[in-house]
Image (cartoon, rainbow, N blue to C red):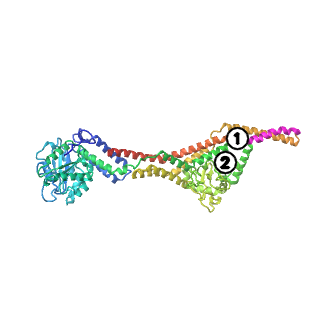
Amino acid sequence: MVQPRSPGVDGGSGGGYRWVADGGRRGAGGGLRGRLDALRELIALSRTRLDGRTLEGAGRVLETADERYRLSGEHTVVAIAGATGSGKSSLFNALAGANRSQVGPRRPTTAEPVACVWPGSRPGAEGLLHRLGVPAHRRHTPADGSSELHGLILIDLPDHDSSATEHRAQVDRMLELVDAVIWVVDPEKYADAVLHERYLRPLAGYAEVMFVVLNQVDRLPGDAADQVVDDLRRLLDEDGLALGEHGEPGAAVLALSAATGRGVGELREALGQFVAERGAADRRLAADVDAAAERLRSVYVAQSQVGLTERARAEFDDRLAEAVGAVATGRAAERDWLRYAERACGSPWARMRGRRGSRWGTGGSGAGAGAAGVGAFTGAGGPTGTGRTDEGRAGALRARTGRTGAGRGVGGRAAVGRTCGGRNEAGRSEAARNEARRNEVGRTGAGMAGAGVTGAGRAGSGQSGGGRAALWRNGVRRGVVGRQGMSGHLPSAGAAAGGGGEPAVDGRAAARPVVEQAVRTVAGEASHGLPAPWAQAVREAADRGAYGLPEALDRVAADAEESLRGGPAVKPRWWTVAASLQGLLSVLQVVGLLWLLGAVTGVGEGTAWVSGLLPALVGSVGGPTLAWLCRVVARGPARRYGQDAERRLRSAAAGCGRARVLEPVAAELLRYREVREQYAVASGA
């Protein structure tokens, strides 16, 4: 028994079509129209991400829908399909009420499609028949012209198992164009593998626009017809074909005999109800969209939740901070602040020794030594003593140049001599590189000797401790002179200067592994779980952003270095107070010493030394004590200053990474979310 079908598509009420003002064009019901629009948008968003063959099927569905909607919505095209000898032409004639299709023992009998048109309230059948390719001489009208089938276009197809190849191809073409199909089987071949495997099983999603008719039941004795029908239902269920039972939508299964007319009236009634709903075309197109969405499922549905987590973003920022040596920069800035405080709060005698030591260091080793040796503080605007190489102050090679030594180490090795921020666009030209090479040969002999002693902050050890040597000329870094071997030691001065050892290394090549690893990691996190085409798009976006990222990070680090060269922007007031006290204590010390000298030489009274002893002791002991107290007090502000420098460089590097890598990756993920939303609408999820 045929179950009533729900009117409209997607649960909508009323007919599946609606006529518009021009009297001939009509639109789909709201649900299907939205799905078609979503599928069209899906294809548009995916053209640059998926190949044409993947989207070809969905494109054909849209073309079919557009073509069908341009034609009559008052007519329903139903094809009768079946195997050789199943009696489909006999059933066609029984429904038409006359012999409109040839019947005979010759096989195949039906060589061309035959049509029978029940006129509707509006014209338009000719366009549908032309689309189907039914010859004009094969178009007929019913004998009785019964009103219950008004709007029906019934097509008798050639045999789907015909020995003629062109017949089978014609059947396959027309099955893609009709609104509904009546499959006619007979008791002998209802279980034919060709029918089930080639047609019914792949078309299981079209159950709502499908009838399955067991013909020739008059040849079955007794209740054998019921048994065959039950077995047919079982096979259809195994094919995944939903059956219209118990009020559920699905294929109608009937038993009849076209020869005797038994059951034909029931099929006619079912067809009349089906045609009157005017929803077959929408249901057929909805099934087409379902099939297209299922084929595209693997390229749109992710295996797991996708997106770039905050943890992945934080790890990416940490790796970029490591690449530019943010931690080392902060520590060097902290040491710089302490040196500035020591210079400001130290005694006048200590400052004089520092200036004398700075002049000696500059004169003895040239600019190279000034940047990398004893006078490491000179570039910052103040000298330090020649003996102040302990604890890495001179080993930092400069407060700013020490930022990438440990930060850019790969596998636990510090990349000494790597400039993250000392290159500019012009410096990447061939002329600038040649100039840098000349710089290295002419200026780094003594400088590298100094670096071998103090470059790592461990006098005499020569080990890399987070610093790097760089040449400066007129305030601009000219080239990289330091390089760390696999053992973790700096090479000799002769080797660094080109005297038979390894040549200097371009900082860009040295920085690239850390940056590339960071990009690969964040791209892997972002693409995890995505369908293959979209995962590839995310990785490509990350790779495009990674191109030039080391150079961009170099410029970021160079800006940070330049901002730290002058020391703290605002000098604490207590430095001035401490300096004044140091001056007062120095005066006391000088006065006391002169008093004592006068007492010893006999200029004053013999007991005058007692009066000079107190100011001499106060000046001599108070100065170092005040300097020690200042160092203790300066630790907290110095730590905050270093942390602020580290934070600024970390933030700048993270901003560079976001602009070049994270934002393009996020844009690809956003595009995927957009197409995923469109896919959900198109698939009806």
Dot 1 alpha-carbon crowd within 10 angstroms: few under 14, some 14 to 19, many 20 or more: few
Amino acid carrying mark 1 in the image:
Leu
Residue 296 in the image, given as x and y percentages of width and height:
34, 50
Q: Quadrant of residue 480?
A: bottom right
Residue 606 seen by the camera: yes
Q: How many marks on residues?
A: 2
Looking at the rendered image, the quarter that the C terminus falls into is: top left
Residue 641 in the image, given as x and y percentages of width and height:
61, 42
Secondary-structure class at tag 1: helix
Residue situated in front as seen by the camera: 583 or 203: 203
Residue 478 in the image, given as x and y percentages of width and height:
60, 52
Q: Is residue 181 left or right of residue 145?
A: right
As drawn, the label of residue 629 is 1
Q: Is residue 278 left or right of residue 51?
A: left
Q: Is residue 39 left or right of residue 146?
A: right
Within the magenta stretch, is there residue 612? yes
Amino acid carrying mark 2 in the image:
Thr
**Residue at numbered disc 2:** 378
Within the magenta stretch, is there residue 242? no
Are the two marked residues, 2 and 1, in contact with CB atoms closer than 8 angstroms?
Answer: no
CA separation in Å, label 2 and label 1 = 25 Å
Secondary-structure class at tag 2: helix
Going from N to C along the chain, the mark reached first, 2 or 1, is: 2
Residue 469 seen by the camera: no
Residue situated in front as seen by the camera: 410 or 568: 410
**Span of residues in magenta:** 604-625
The residue most toward the front is 222
Examine the rendered structure and indicate whether residue 607 appears above or below residue 386: above
Residue 293 in the image, given as x and y percentages of width and height:
32, 49
